[in-house]
Image: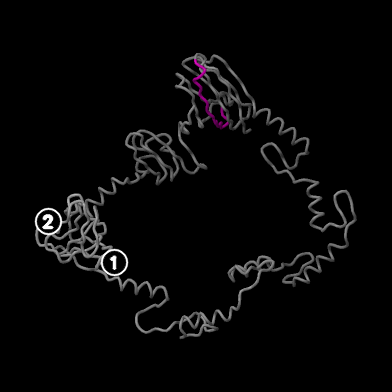
Amino acid sequence: MSLDFFRIERGLELDDLVQYLQGVGNPGVAGDSADALVGSVYTDNVTGAIWTKISAGTGTDKWQKLASETYVNNAVGATISWREPAKVRDNVATVLPTGTPTSPITVDGVSITNGQRVLFSALSGGAGKNVYVYDQAAGVFVEDTNNESSGDAVYVDAGTSAGVTYVFNGSAWVQTDQTSLDELGFIRSFIGKSAAGSEVPVYATNNFALIGTSLETAIGALDTEIGANVSNGNFIFAANKINANIQALDTHLGVNFAAGNYITLNQTVSGAVTALDVKIGPDVVTGGSVVAGNSVSSNLQALDTQIGPDVTNGGYVLAANSANANIQALDTALTNATLQTTVNNVTSVQTIDTAPVGTDAAKWFVRAELVSDPTRVYATEVYALSDGTATGSDFTRYATLKLGTAIPGLVVSVDAVGGLLRLRVVAGSAVNVTARRASVLI
């Protein structure tokens, strides 16, 4: 026995919003791919191309093909010369240096090993100024397959040119940045300095962090005003941030009081509690579920537990029904929804089960076993939909499994005759079929 793939024979639809489809050729001409909603995905089984639906309607122009890695490489490589970083830059050697086969070579004070790249920007002969890759096995440098062209940029990782970018201007590699300038930009952004030159901090307020004081002084003033850390309490904790503790207190206090039957608008907490206490009145006496010693909430909970929750309107249970009427409705629904049927020696098209009158949708579990070879088994789930007309229906098979080789000519389908949904099976060789009606919508 082996684990098989999860097979979907027609397509996958998520929440009536997006479909995952497959077929031969471009999508959108007809059928499911033409009706698919925007955002759906389609796979061409011949080329492997993947498409997404970008606008509603029929036609391939309503779909967009996703770019593959090969497509992007070909498109970009035809017009732009991308350059990987170089390990170091050599601006001294006019000819390529050679090393000892199988050994690293030192360039600009850095040990270069097999496959590492070096920008030789002073070469006067040979292939010219470009990036070269070290072949350690042979002890020689080989020019990068990407030839230099005007506008190419190479970033250097190590050596005396570490952190610097060089751009080829058509005849030479020239420096275009300076790491120190970059770092100054990072520092300026970090401290919030808005411009170059002498500038004192400007704060949004002047309550504790005074305008013109340094960052360090301002932070000290704010720290003094905030004071020491709080200790753990019922709602605030020492490990929390100030905002988190304020939020905890605010959440516990709740929203402002609104005018009600006993609480007036914007009343104080104590005034509101007193008004409610007067209304609640004296303690209750012990009864069947209510106990005098319990809190009000405990007694209310006891009553609520005893009564149980209200029913809500559903497919068969209605809030207005009596308990007996709702139980009868559920019993009738379960009888219709969970019926198992077995039909043996099926070859020609046979109806295995028929959903009850008025069914809008139904679901079946179906198992078929080849009579001549019981090790060949097929199982699937079928979901069907009816529009209530004499012949209007649609269905899909999913969660399909099989043991052994395929059963010849086996087809499981659903149709509608006279408004009734029928589960149908046909096979090229005799099969024993068992179907269980899992659920129905009426």
Percent across and percent down for residue 53 are: 40, 44
Q: Magenta span has 384?
A: yes
Q: Could you tell me if residue 141 is visible in this image?
A: no
Query: Which one is in front, 424 or 401?
Result: 401
The residue at the point 57 percent across, 26 percent down is 421
Quadrant position of residue 247: bottom right
Q: Secondary structure at mark 2?
A: loop
The residue drawn where x is 29% and y is 49% is 72
User: Is 255 placed left or right of 190 in the picture?
Assistant: right
Q: Are marks 1 and 2 in contact (CB under 8 Å)?
A: no
Q: What residue would you read off at disc 2?
A: 127
Q: Is residue 235 left or right of residue 219?
A: right
Identify the image quadrant of the C terminus: top right
User: Is residue 271 among what the camera can see?
Assistant: yes
Colour setup of the view = one colour
> Any magenta on residue 309?
no
Q: Amino acid at mark 2?
A: Ala
Q: Secondary structure at mark 1?
A: loop
Percent x, y for residue 417?
56, 23
* Residue 281 horizontal side relative to residue 6, left or right: right
Q: Residue at x 44, y 82 (%)?
A: 201
- Does label 1 or label 2 sit earlier along the sequence? 2
Q: What residue is shown with label 1?
A: 163
Give the image location of residue 276, x and y in percent.
Answer: 80, 65
Q: Which residues fall within the magenta stretch?
A: 373-389
Residue appearing at x 86%, y 57% in the figure: 293
